[in-house]
Image: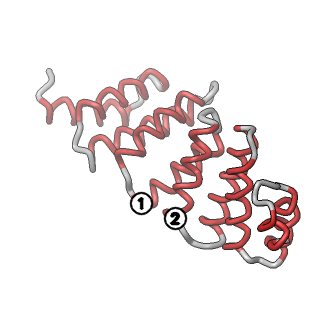
Amino acid sequence: YKRLHRLDEADVEPLEAMAPLSMMLSDWSEHVEVLAKKAELISGDDERAHLYQQVGGAKRDMMDDQGGAIVAYEKAFELDPASVTTADALIDLHESRQDASRLVELYRRRIDLTDNNDDLRYELLSRMARSYEGVLNQRREAIEALREALAVRANDKAVLQWLDQLFRHEQMW
């Protein structure tokens, strides 16, 4: 199939046959290469996003290539910014790298994608506040995230105490 693909590199059909074979053989580098080539050749954004999700998953789970997984998932997210699956994968990857600046963007995007799940909204807003307060040292943004969390869970004692601490530190009376 590789030789057949080399004869006409614009033909997706040999790639269609190569993808399951490379997966059955657990040849993950070949599998990722085939999926990436296929993603470059097809025109539908939804299918391309799905292929990049597969590339990201293989790189993360089978090849232990976190950086490569992030690149693939970012491509998928560009093509399908409403994908909860891709957002969650990116959040997990960036949390493991403690990339706070990208995380706050991803948390915000994931909150926007959350439908009627107050527990998840609260959790994401809390994580966002932690990132703002800690690594980014942006306490005022942490306060705004906590205010949003308080709107989700009014009178939450932990959030109120956290806000009190931040208000005192920022001298916001």
Q: Residue at x 59, y 30 (%)?
A: 113
Q: What colour-coding does the image apply? A: secondary structure
Q: Residue at x 71, y 72 (%)?
A: 30
| Residue with the mark numbered 1 | 97
Q: Residue at x 73, y 64 (%)?
A: 34
Nearer to us of marks 2 and 1 is: 2
Q: Amino acid at mark 1?
A: Arg
Pick whichever, 55 or 161, lies toward us.
Answer: 55
Mark 2 and mark 1 residues within 8 Å of each other at the beta carbon: yes
Q: Quadrant of residue 22?
A: bottom right
Task: Tell me how far mark 2 sits from mark 1, CA to CA.
Answer: 9 Å
Residue extending furthest left? 171
Q: Position of residue 44 (x, y in %)?
A: 75, 38
| Residue with the mark numbered 2 | 66
Badge 2 or badge 1: first in the primary sequence: 2
Q: Secondary structure at mark 1?
A: helix
Q: Position of residue 38 (x, y in %)?
A: 74, 55
Pick whichever, 149 or 62, lies toward us.
Answer: 62
User: Looking at the picture, does residue 100 appear above or below residue 143?
Assistant: below
Q: Few, some or many C-alpha atoms within 10 Å of disc 1 (few <14, some 14-19, many ≥20)?
A: few
Q: Secondary structure at mark 2?
A: helix
Q: Position of residue 32 (x, y in %)?
A: 68, 65
Q: Amino acid at mark 2?
A: Gln
Q: Pick the quarter of the image with the C terminus.
A: top left
Q: Residue at x 66, y 52 (%)?
A: 52
Q: Position of residue 167 (x, y in %)?
A: 19, 29
Q: Pick the quarter of the image with the N terminus.
A: bottom right
The answer to whether 83 appears left or right of 98 in the picture is right
Q: Few, some or many C-alpha atoms within 10 Å of disc 2 (few <14, some 14-19, many ≥20)?
A: some
Pick whichever, 51 or 161, lies toward us.
Answer: 51
Pick whichever, 44 or 91, lies toward us.
Answer: 44
